[in-house]
Amino acid sequence: MADVQWIAAGRADALAPGARKLVFVPGGVSIVVYHHQGRFFALENSCPHAGAALSASACEGHLISCPAHGLRFDVRNGQCTASAALRIPTYGVVMEDGQLWLSPPPAA
């Protein structure tokens, strides 16, 4: 796992199916990790529209909803269902020896 600044996100078995958790990284960024249908997805915990935290939103059919305005986003790619211009940065998720690791999105 060289050449990437991996972020430890905890043990995979500590995140039950259908659950979510917050991961905090230096610099004030928080990431929400979802365990959905046997896979793990990680997104920045901030709606690109107005910055509302997304961590309170349960994942339903690969979609989460912004609690502030109801915008819906696909956890697989961060894309807003209502606007091609709105996307949440996503993190790659790798499991190694039962530990979840997140790789940051490419620099803009």
Image (cartoon, helix red, strand yellow):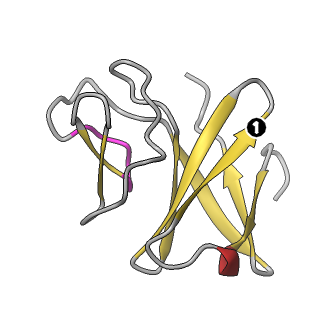
Q: Which is nearer the eye, 77 or 36?
A: 36
Q: Which is nearer the eye, 2 or 85?
A: 85
Give the quadrant of residue 8. bottom right
Residue 9 in the image: x percent, y percent? 73, 58
For the N terminus, give its image quadrant.
bottom right
Residue 102 in the image: x percent, y percent? 68, 53
Q: Magenta segment, principal secondary structure?
A: loop
| SS at mark 1 in the image | strand
Instruction: Give left or right: position of 46 versus 64.
Output: right
**Residue 76 included in the magenta stretch of the image:** yes
Instruction: Give left or right: position of 97 versus 65.
Output: right
Question: What crowding class fits label 1: few (fewer than 14 Cα within 10 Å), some (14-19), or many (20 or more)?
Answer: few
The structure residue drawn at horizontal position 35% and vertical position 32%, both measured from the top left corner, is 87
**Residue 53 included in the magenta stretch of the image:** no
Residue at the far left in the pictured view: 82
Residue 71 higher or lower than 43, as above or below: above
Residue at the far top in the pictured view: 50
Instruction: Give left or right: position of 71 versus 103.
Output: left
Mark 1 residue type: Val
**Residue bounds of the magenta highlight:** 75-80
For the C terminus, give its image quadrant.
top right
Which residue bears the numbered disc 1?
25
The structure residue drawn at horizontal position 46% and vertical position 80%, both measured from the top left corner, is 38
Residue 88 higher or lower than 85, as above or below: below
Residue 104 in the image: x percent, y percent? 65, 41
Residue at the far right in the pictured view: 2
